[in-house]
Image (tube, rainbow, N blue to C red):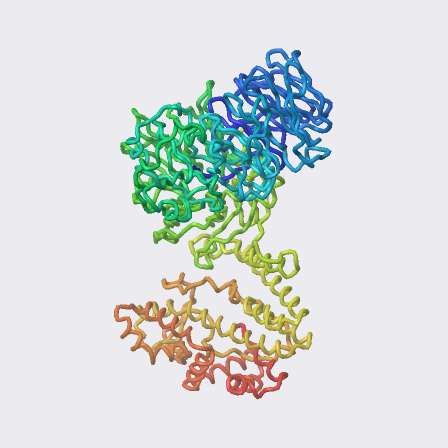
Amino acid sequence: MPCERKPMRYGHSEGHTEVCFDDSGKFIVTCGNDGDVRIWESLDDDDPKFITVGEKAFSLALRNGKLVTASSNNTVQIHTFPDGDPDGILTRFTTNATHVTFNSSGSRVAAGSSDFMVKVVDVSDSSQQKTLRGHEAPVLSVAFDPKDDFLASASCDGSVVVWNIEEQTQAISWPLLQKTNDVSNAKSLCRLSWQPGTGKFLAVPVEMKVHLYERGSWDHVSNLSDDLLTQPINVVAWSPCGRFLAAGSVGGSMTVWDVNSKVCVERQKHEKGFTVCSLSWNPSGSQIAYTDTEGCLGMLDGFSSSTTDTNKQVPVKKTAKDYDDLFDDDDDRLMDEGLSDTNSPVKKPVAADDDDDDDFLMPATGRVRNRGAILDDENSLDTGSLRLGQDKFGDDDDAGSTVEPTAAPLVPLRPVYEGPMPTPPQRAFQPGSTPAHLTHRFMMWNSVGIVRGYNDELDNAIDVEFHDSAVHHAMHLTNSLGHTMADLSQEAVLLACPSTDELASKLQCLHFSSWDTNKEWMVDLPQGEDVKALCLGQGWAAVATNTLMLRMFSIGGVQREIFSLPGPVVCMSGHGEQLLIVYHRATGFDGDQALGVQLLQFSRRRRQIINGEPLPLSHKSHLSWLGFTAEGTPCYVDSDGVVRMLNRTLGNTWTPVCNTRETCKSKSDHYWVVGVHENPQQLRCIPCKGSRFPPTLPRPAVAILPFKLPLCQTSTEKGQMEEQFWRSALFHNHYSFLSSSGYEINEDGQNQSQKEQQELLMKMFALSCKLEREFRCVELAELMTQNVVTLAIKYASRSRRMVLAQRLSEIALEKANQIQEEEREEEEPEYSSYRRTSGYSGCVQVLGSGKPSSSSGQPRVTNILDNMTSSKKSTPLSGSAGKQNKTPVLKPLAPRPKTKVSPSANLLKIETSQPKTGFQLWLEENRKNIIADNPDLEETEIIKEAMGKFRTLSAEERLSWTERAKGQSGDAADVKKRKRAEGGEDVENKNENTEADENSAKKKKSLDPSSKLSVFAFNKN
């Protein structure tokens, strides 16, 4: 019996939960520990209607448009269905009722209670009650005989009793269960069930078996068991046809037996192993809904209905038609190989009839592991693939319903898919909107405002409200076109509606920021093309359609670029000049969605930043929100509540920054994200109790959640500081992105963020020193700026860690050289442009810095232990933290104001700037090789290529080139000395330090620790 186990979904708060179908099978109705009854149109219904019946709801029953519930106020209430209007109280107990059920006609309700009593009440006249007394402990369950003569009940006193309703006496009592003092302590709920129709059998779950008792004689006729059941059975339920019996156990196992053959035809396991506390068959017989003790709702789908007359005989020749597609609908579960010969369906004669082809059952949990063992001769049949109806196997004494096995044809073996099953792709949606089927819904909630849609008997309209009324006043629009999608920006409102038989899909834009009088435009999409997603940016609008097309428009209505998407769109979001698109790149498997993401930037240099990379999601989750932070960083949220943000400094990877589920009080609660801010760090969202999205009224309150990177051991001091540092680094990446995109940035905020990060590094450094983790200290120093490394050296020297201080001095020296090289790289393009326009082909020294050209590639040296004060560099970004994202600028820099000088002064300046740096000397010797490798490069590109190659050299090699350059610049050295003397410095001491610095690379190992500490000093000017 192949069936599909649907993914579980949260229905109620943690605790006992019950489920049933309505008479038509259209609705699933559940009740739970939160006191609500929820009415689901399907398992995928994200907005079930709910009725609050009390603080807790223990049981429910539904028949003929009447909904009966047992609640915590000791009453059994009745409501109309599906409206949910209260219709009175049927009966009361002295304690809470534990189970309620309807009879087959829906005219009477039976209820068992913790006060040991069972009551039978007429629905039409609640004064007509019968009270059945005799149990000595709380009642576990009650079940009506289909003929309305008997009522069965189970109790914590260990007995199962069959009552004669009219006489209010016990017909029979069996001591079958373990005694307990309360329902909450019972090993099993022992939910009884009568066979529908004739009521021939009463099914009683006892430990790991189901006992079948015959009506009338009350004989124990047989047991249904399964070798794989290891936990007590909690609940049993008959199929509507009376042919199959389903059972759910404490351990989460769900088993379906064919009662006639006593064969297990289906096995399923709860995806998390929770206790199954309620089962209900769909009246069509095609589905089983079940709930667990965690408040979750699940479904087994794909059972075949068995409603046709099974007593008809068919000719043997028709059997071949029935077995043509034996394994087409086979599933991927394993069959129990422990069936005995007497129970094996292979050994039994087979009945055939003209049943509907949809009657498809398997005699075990799924596929036979070794088909050859069964299909080994022409007289064997794999009954796991037979089309079965009621009594198709027939009882052994029913000779008229059998056919000779020799008449069966050979079964063709076909390849069977063994892998994971594909996941249905999620539908396209608008981030920040609630489901479109709601009459009152949010069409958009973002950082600009709120768009609400109303579609009821009174009105079909759209309200637009702005968070900042200075942007625009609130608007009320008549929704005559039936718009279902919307987006809102500082410039416009964008609306779209699907196509109909008569009208095309339309795009409407209200450009309220326009300076002319015409503030509205509309576009009809081509026939057969429907809008699936839309978004607004700065000066543009984008629309994705069902034809895998993305259409761009200007904000004034001019059609712009159009391009094809790699797959069906899921959602889009825009911010400034950025467009983020998520689409289905492939079919997902095993519950996962296979989504791809594209990030485009519409600046002057239009480019695609992310090109079809897979979008990471949590296992078995889907995308629930997509957008940008207020600062322009892409981020998204999946259905498991994990928020991920783009890390531009790590190759455009996605970093999880928050898990909203960690702050939810109940598993049925969720957070609906409406905005993300990086500075200050805020996740703005709306708490939703018992649902995934909020109602429009009353107006939801926005909550602010903190961010937290999922690092290890964040409860320790080290883990906390590591999390704070990397979170600060991630959330301040937007400064470099905005700066590179041409936006003005808040330098105070940027400096503050760098200061915060360096302070955290210094704290981690001090902690590592205390723990005597010197290697870790050096690793932390690599992340520091040169100024903070100086403080780290001071801390290490005062802690008497001279080896560590020496290591740090080497890092300080390397950072100083790195800063000089980066400054030189930034100035090189400006110089090369100047050289081409001025005609001085021999001038290699970079000009325009406004400072004397005394750069020799080697820092000035002083004893840092004598003078630990550090002056602030004039450049705004100091150290590796500020330079790590900066690439060489290959366009001329903005011209600086210059004072008028005479031509002779210019000549003098050019002559005195002749000394070369190590990089220039290396470039002269390697220029031919670079041009030979790249003959098409221009001058600026040659310099850029040379910079990259020079940077790959080791520190010693770069130092040797610098020394060679100094050896060729004696005159420049004299100029350097004179200028230093003018500055009031001691020339002789500086020369001595310079000579020591020149030889430091060769003599490092021979120096004592005190002399080594003088090496890391450097000149910041």
Q: Decide which of 529, 67 is in the foreground and name it.
A: 67
Q: Decide which of 72, 541 is in the foreground and name it.
A: 72
Q: Is residue 70 left or right of residue 556?
A: right
Q: Is residue 534 visible?
A: no
Q: Decide which of 183, 751 is in the foreground and name it.
A: 183
For the point 52% across and 47% down, the residue is 643
For the point 46% across and 79% down, the residue is 856
- Count of picture labels: 0
Q: Is residue 343 left or right of residue 1017?
A: left
User: Can you give x and y, in whole percent of width and height, for residue 669 in the image?
Assistant: 58, 38
Q: Quadrant of the N terminus?
A: top left
Q: Decide which of 565, 149 is in the foreground and name it.
A: 149
Residue 1006 versus residue 840 in the image, above or below: below
Q: Is residue 33 left or right of residue 696?
A: right
Residue 806 versus residue 752 in the image, above or below: below
For the point 56% across and 47% down, the residue is 659
Q: Quadrant of residue 4?
A: top left
Q: Is residue 118 visible?
A: yes
User: Can you give x and y, in whole percent of width and height, for residue 894 in the image?
Assistant: 40, 61
User: Can you give x and y, in whole percent of width and height, for residue 854 in the image?
Assistant: 47, 78
Q: Quadrant of residue 115?
A: top right
User: Can you give x and y, in whole percent of width and height, for residue 696 in the image?
Assistant: 53, 29
